[in-house]
Amino acid sequence: MSEEFLEEAYWYDGYAEENDLRYKHLLDSVKVNDILLLKSCATRGPNHSISFTRLKAIGRVTEIINFYTYSVSWLDNEELPLDFDDISYMKTIELMRDDEMKRYVVDFLNRQ
């Protein structure tokens, strides 16, 4: 879905679209101008012992279409995709923690 999200300038939670409301409390808290990160998580290395999150895109929410679908202005960043070892964001949507990936995003936004 990443390519479609980037090409069509939106993001949605497929679980909510199927009436699975496990993330509704977070989806309801998203506002216009919030920053949204497009990411994936996986493991690599011997015995898949290293978890990592791949940051694919950074965007700004421009419109709330419904509680689980947002128009997004994806920001140009030639450094992406970028992997962050030992960081795992496995949920479809979650708040950022104070980690290396968040520091990277904040620094990137400050350079804009």
Image (tube, rainbow, N blue to C red):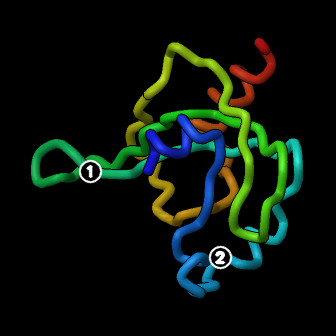
How packed mark 2 is, by other alpha carbons closer than 10 Å (few <14, some 14-19, many 20 or more), is: some
Name the disc covering residue 43, or none. Answer: 1
Give the mark toward the camera: 1 or 2: 2
Visible residue check, residue 49: yes
In which quadrant of the rendered view does residue 109 lie? top right
Q: Residue at x 61, y 77 (%)?
A: 16
Q: Residue at x 53, y 69 (%)?
A: 14
How packed mark 1 is, by other alpha carbons closer than 10 Å (few <14, some 14-19, many 20 or more), is: some
Whole-percent x, y for residue 36 in the image: 69, 45
Q: Nearer the viewer, residue 16 or 36?
A: 16
In which quadrant of the rendered view does residue 17 lie? bottom right
Whole-percent x, y for residue 37 in the image: 62, 43
Q: Secondary structure at mark 1?
A: strand
Whole-percent x, y for residue 57 in the image: 56, 33
Which of the marked residues, 1 or 2, is nearer the chain's N terminus? 2
Visible residue check, residue 100: no
Count of number-bearing discs: 2
Image quadrant for the C terminus? top right
Q: Residue at x 61, y 83 (%)?
A: 22
User: Vertical placement of 99 versus 12: above or below?
Assistant: above
Q: Which residue is mark 2?
A: 23
Residue type at tag 1: Thr
User: Vertical placement of 99 versus 14: above or below?
Assistant: above
Q: Secondary structure at mark 2?
A: loop
Q: Residue at x 59, y 87 (%)?
A: 19
Q: Is residue 74 left or right of residue 81?
A: right
Residue type at tag 2: Tyr
Whole-percent x, y for residue 49 in the image: 21, 52
